[in-house]
């Protein structure tokens, strides 16, 4: 699709540009491809010195893919000297060392020099050689500079039109041809103030779960964390989205349509109700137990939340297979490690007689099935989750469960 990306409503570029001279080009295809790439990069003046297959050339037209105006305006010359007669600055391109006392420059440097000379009103030409044997020494001698491209020394010779492409590309960049389009900017960049507000909220939530540990590393951790987001150069919308993500994670699922979220006191009340009403103890019916355990998992009490946070961040208990609010038979346990066959039972400060009875029944059920039960005082866990963890670890190792 030669026309892809082409905007036919745009005027053809007519700013002054270098003349491209092809010396004795052998293949019409290469002339056409060179014309095409000249048009791509805003050059229009082509000079052909004795094209081997004659002129005009049908194969050139096919390869030009629409850059006909470059071909139609091409000038035919009998010699390189005639082609560059009215030029004041000439560059000869070659892959080969010619051992001539003449500056050798890159295509980029050539573009810079051509640009300043053309801006000053000079007429400039870039000369390309024959496909088979390039430019002769006498032809190179006519030039002011030699242009060579950085290439694999073991395979240095480019296709003629491709060499033209590189030189024309460098010219166009130099002549101010910026990228034709860029990433769409759908939201303006976030202000530092907006970012600071996000960081404050993020850090507040992370403090709640004692993320910034140990204290002496806290300030470095904060800086590193901020830098992750600063490097992104987020837009205002990005920061709003991140804020939403943070709120969703910190506060749980949104909106009553999805069942809402209970606060710590409500979550505690839910457990009391379940305990008093016999929980999911429906004979031969596992569905309700599972549904309840999901509900409990989603609505942790404060004690469950802080203990779980401490547990997942504790190396001693990493990989021990602990899970939260899991049904075991008709009961739902606060924490369980099946590999260690151990249950952590969080005991609330006060509970009704019915709830206490249900708890006793649960423990008996678990003990009968070989589970070790570690009772943890819920209020103590909230006050000092790490001490509660230490007690669990001590309990596990004392009983040889290590
Ligand atoms: N075998 C020839 C290469 C000809 S390629 C030789 O040894 O010179 C055709 C033309 O493309 C060359 O004359 C030159 O104008 C250009 N060209 C090819 N490779 C190039 C390179 N590495 N650096 C600069 N110009 C190159």
Image: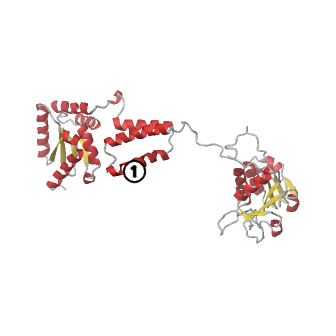
Badge 1 element = helix
Q: Report x, y in % for residue 174.
A: 71, 51
Q: In the figure, residue 112 lies in which quadrant?
A: bottom right
Question: In the displayed structure, does residue 132 sit left or right of residue 211?
Answer: right
Q: In the figure, residue 384 lies in which quadrant?
A: top left
Image position of 379 with respect to 77: above or below: above
Q: In the figure, residue 145 lies in which quadrant?
A: bottom right
Is residue 79 among what the camera can see?
A: no
Residue placed at 42% from the left, 41% from the top? 199
Work out which residue is located at the far top of the displayed protein and give it.
Answer: 256
Depth check, front residue: 15 or 42: 15
Location of the C terminus by quadrant is: bottom left
Question: In the displayed structure, does residue 401 sit left or right of residue 180?
Answer: left
What residue is shown with label 1? 220
Depth check, front residue: 27 or 219: 219
Q: Quadrant of ligand 1?
A: bottom right
Question: In the displayed structure, does residue 252 sit left or right of residue 228?
Answer: left
Residue placed at 25% from the left, 47% from the top? 322
Is residue 96 among what the camera can see?
A: yes
CB of residue at label 1: within 8 Å of ligand 1? no
Image position of 152 with respect to 364: above or below: below
């Amino acid at each position: 699709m030669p026309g892809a990306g082409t905007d036919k409503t745009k005027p053809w570029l007519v700013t002054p540009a270098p003349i491209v001279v092809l010396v004795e080009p052998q293949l019409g295809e290469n002339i056409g491809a060179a014309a095409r790439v000249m048009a791509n990069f805003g050059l229009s003046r082509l000079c052909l010195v004795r094209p081997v297959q004659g002129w005009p050339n049908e194969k050139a037209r096919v390869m030009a893919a629409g850059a006909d105006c470059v071909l139609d305006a091409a000038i035919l010359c009998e010699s390189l000297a005639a082609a560059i007669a009215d030029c004041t600055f000439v560059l000869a391109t070659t892959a080969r060392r010619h051992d001539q006392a003449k500056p050798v420059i890159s295509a980029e440097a050539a573009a810079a020099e051509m640009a300043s000379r053309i801006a000053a009103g000079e007429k400039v030409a870039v000369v390309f050689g024959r496909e088979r044997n390039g430019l002769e020494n006498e032809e190179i001698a006519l030039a002011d500079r030699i242009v060579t491209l950085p290439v694999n020394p073991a395979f240095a010779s480019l296709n003629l039109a491709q060499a033209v492409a590189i030189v024309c590309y460098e010219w166009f960049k130099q002549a101010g041809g910026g990228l034709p389009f860029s990433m769409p900017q759908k939201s303006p960049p976030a202000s530092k103030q907006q970012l600071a507000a996000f960081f404050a909220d993020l850090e507040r939530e992370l403090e709640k779960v004692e993320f910034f540990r140990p204290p002496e590393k806290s300030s470095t951790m904060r800086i590193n964390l901020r830098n992750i987001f600063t490097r992104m150069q987020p837009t205002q919308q990005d920061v709003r989205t991140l804020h939403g993500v943070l709120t969703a994670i910190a506060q749980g699922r949104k909106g009553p349509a999805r069942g809402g979220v209970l606060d710590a006191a409500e979550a505690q009340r839910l457990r009391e109700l379940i305990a008093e009403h016999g929980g999911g103890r429906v004979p031969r019916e596992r569905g309700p137990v599972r549904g309840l355990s999901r509900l409990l998992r989603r609505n942790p009490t404060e004690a469950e939340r802080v203990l779980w946070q401490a547990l997942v961040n504790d190396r001693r208990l990493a990989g021990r297979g602990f899970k939260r609010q899991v049904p075991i038979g008709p009961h739902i346990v606060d924490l369980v490690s099946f590999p260690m066959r151990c249950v952590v039972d969080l005991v609330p400060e006060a509970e009704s007689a019915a709830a206490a009875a249900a708890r006793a029944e649960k423990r008996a059920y678990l003990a009968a099935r070989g589970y070790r039960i570690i009772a943890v005082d819920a209020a103590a866990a909230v006050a000092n989750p790490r001490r509660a963890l230490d007690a669990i670890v001590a309990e596990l190792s004392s009983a040889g469960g290590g």
